[in-house]
Image: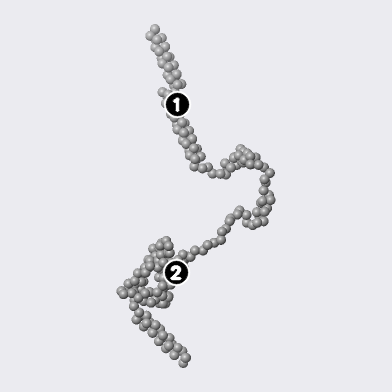
Amino acid sequence: MKLLIPILLVLSVFFESSTLKAQERKIVQYSGIVTTVGSGLPVGYATVTNLSFRNEAIAANNEGYFSFVAHVGDTLRFSSVGFDPLIVTVPEVAGDKYTASIVMQNLVTELPMVTPYPWASIEEFNIAFMNLDVSEDHIVRAKRTLSNESLSAMAAVVPRDGNEMRSINNAQSFNTMNNKVINQRYANPLLNPFAWGSLIQQITKGSQSRSKSSRY
């Protein structure tokens, strides 16, 4: 207990001195934009950490703009996913505002070239290669592929394309309109030849009956 009190006194004196030093330093409004090297595109939502003041952190907006209050001489760390972290120091300025242009370097990682194969291993490739049938020539394989059985099997599983669907829709529309015209033609008695024949027979029978009645 006797040792604890002196330690607390030393720590309090240390923190008070650091606080007084921080208060003695000049306060500035530190603003700026975070961009990338070369392209100049903004780095959205980059994190700015004040390492000299309790590691307080803020985030830039989606356009890379930031603005906060800092002391002259504070050490700032700019970080973002995919970029190399950058350490800067708040400089001494004449006024109470400072605008910085922060340029961050992209982290480019080159991966080795990869060639994809449809086989999971060399053993599967060797098996597939040994079972490869090369006895037939190109003409025989083409005839087998273009046979009626092969085309029917492919037509059953392969979906129709846009041109085929449009041709089918046009044919269906034509048949529907043709059927409507035929039905209207025979529905109208003036366009039905059988109706005209029946009308002529009725007129002839009526004329004959009138002539017989006039004789009597």
Q: CA distance from mark 2 to mark 1?
A: 84 Å
The amino acid sitting under disc 2 is Ser
Q: What SS does tag 2 mark?
A: strand
For the C terminus, the image quarter is top left
Q: Earlier in the sequence, mark 2 or mark 1?
A: 2
Based on the displayed image, in which of its 4 quarters is residue 57 positioned?
bottom left
Q: Which mark is residue 141?
A: none
Q: Position of residue 72 (x, y in %)?
A: 36, 76
Q: Front-most of 152 and 75? A: 75
Assess disc 1: are there few (<14), some (14-19) or many (≥20) residues with their C-alpha within 10 Å of its C-alpha.
some
Q: Front-most of 156 and 107? A: 107
* Tag 2 residue: 79
* Tag 1 residue: 186
Based on the displayed image, in which of its 4 quarters is residue 85 positioned?
bottom left
State whether residue 67 is above or below residue 25: above
The amino acid sitting under disc 1 is Tyr
Assess disc 2: are there few (<14), some (14-19) or many (≥20) residues with their C-alpha within 10 Å of its C-alpha.
some
State whether residue 216 is above or below residue 174: above
